[in-house]
Amino acid sequence: MRAVFDHPLFFKITVNLKYELLAVCRCYQDMIYPILFLILVIVLFPLSVSPDPVLLNKISAGIFWIVVLFLVLLMLDQLFRNDWKEGDLEQLILTPNALSLAIFIKLLVFCLAISLPLIVMTPFLSLCLYIPIRALKTLCWSIFLGTPSLIFLGGIARALTLGLRHSGLLIVLIVIPFYIPVLIFASSAVSFASMGLSANGPLAWLSVLMLLSVSLSPLVIRMILRLGIAFV
Amino acid sequence: MMKKRRMVKVYRFIAIKHFYNLAGYLLPLLAVFVLILGTYGSIGGLYLAPADYQQGDAFRIIYVHVPSAFLSLFIYLVMAMAAVIGLIFRIKLADLIVSGSVFLGSWFTFLALLTGSVWAKPMWGAWWVWDARLTSELILLFLYLGVIALRSAIPEPRVAAKATAVLLMLGLANIPIIHYSVYWWNTLHQGATIHLLSPSLIERSMLYPLLAMIAAFTGYYFIVLLLYIRCKVLEDNIKINSANNWQLTKVNIFHT
């Protein structure tokens, strides 16, 4: 057991994790923004489309996941922004340490900061949209499995557009083709669960996408950051 | 002691000067190729091929739809290969190939979708259905437009080349999905009728003009690409020359 704690990799992981979690805890209002955004936007849908429970039952899975998608796209603009503006990112790229590990921890903490408020608010929001109670567990699972893939793929687009003007809009243009499979699987999982069928198929696909994106995108982001787009 | 290796002569065309001359040599040949095959494909397809027993004369849009769809995938593969090679070996020609193909590639994808929906309205009764092949082709169009957007947003050209190379590599996952979508899912779009190694499922008098049209469209793409590369090389040369000789141009301006 001591060998685990003395290993340099463990030290690197815990140091990065502590730093990132400290940064999040110092501005904890960043965790409240997702909650407010979700409530405000989801409330718009029954008001504008129709408050009919039967109709909303059919489309609520898709609506919820599209709102989650928009939330992630809007929050992605903040991903490496503070580090880049203050010069930490440049120093991180220049040091000989494991850049991909640091990127992975940053993305992981960002993902936790978004998905934990999401999962907390899900029961209340499913009331607004008439998502049936039996779909609630699948909804939480789909958020837990789908949000990492959204954020890790969005991290690639974020690294590509780091120093540019209209970076928020460019992220949306670049990354939406890669989000379409995640969206399809997540909303179909919730739709199946709403109808009472088993949602294991789409959830399994979601976990495939999550494992692939979580493991491979830190390497891609490291390559992109080393290209020096943000430091022109 | 190192064995003396003979240099492979083809590799010298990676250099821009030699590629410029090669392109100048190939362009008339390609033009003749496109003219002959295009004429045969058009006349054979629109006039000589018999009308389909089920679709009547409306099937003849296949002679535009299939080449555009084939070319949209082919151009993406060419761009992605050039991008990867340029990223690994740092070849300037690779970026010229990518920037020269991206607009035409997105235009062919749009054309494939457009001619496809024009064909779909009489045959399937709807302009658009959300089946696997059409949706993945639409995603391909978004990928092309994303590449154009990213490329135009980064001001420094060499950095823009590397960024678009990364984006192109990521989009490669879509190509097998488009190609195999008719096998993997139950789609409204028909399956493959042209096979590479076994007899095709389409009548030969319809098949040969179709293959000719595909070859003619590909030749047209290469003509546009080579012309673009030649023009871009000349432009860059003018910029370099005027940057080197700015003293002279300055004198001409002020002492006219």
Image (cartoon, rainbow, N blue to C red):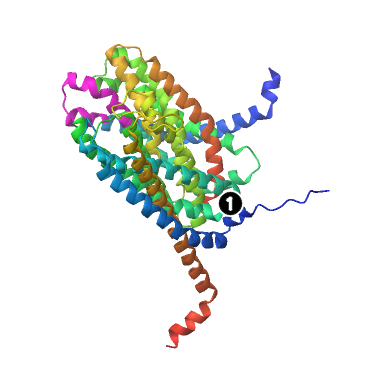
The secondary element bearing badge 1 is classed as loop
Left or right? Give the position of A224 relative to A179.
right
Placement of A227 over or under A60, stated as above or below: below
Residue A115, position as x, y percentages in the image: 41, 27
Q: Residue at the spot x=29%, y=13% of the render? A: A133
Q: Nearer the viewer, residue B37 or B150?
A: B37
Q: Nearer the viewer, residue A192 or A36?
A: A192
Q: Residue furthest right?
A: B1
Question: What is the chain identity of the residue bearing mark 1?
Answer: B
Left or right? Give the position of A48 relative to B239.
left
The stretch of residues the image draws in magenta is A42-68
Placement of A109 over or under A157, stated as above or below: above
Left or right? Give the position of A136 relative to A46.
right
Residue A52, position as x, y percentages in the image: 15, 22
Count all numbered tags in the image, as a single digit: 1
Q: Nearer the viewer, residue A127 or A179?
A: A179
Q: Residue at the spot x=36%, y=43% of the render? A: A173
Does the magenta segment cover residue A10?
A: no
Q: Nearer the viewer, residue B219 or B136?
A: B219
Does the magenta segment cover residue A59?
A: yes
Residue B58, position as x, y percentages in the image: 21, 38
What is the quadrant of the N terminus of chain A in the image? top right
Placement of B223 over or under A179, stated as above or below: below
Left or right? Give the position of B77 relative to B13.
left
Q: Is residue B116 visible to the viewer in this orientation of the structure? A: yes
Q: Identify the main secondary structure in magenta.
A: helix
Q: Given the image, on which type of amino acid does mark 1 rest?
A: Arg
Reading the image, the residue beneath label 1 is: B90
> Quarter of the image holding residue A121?
top left
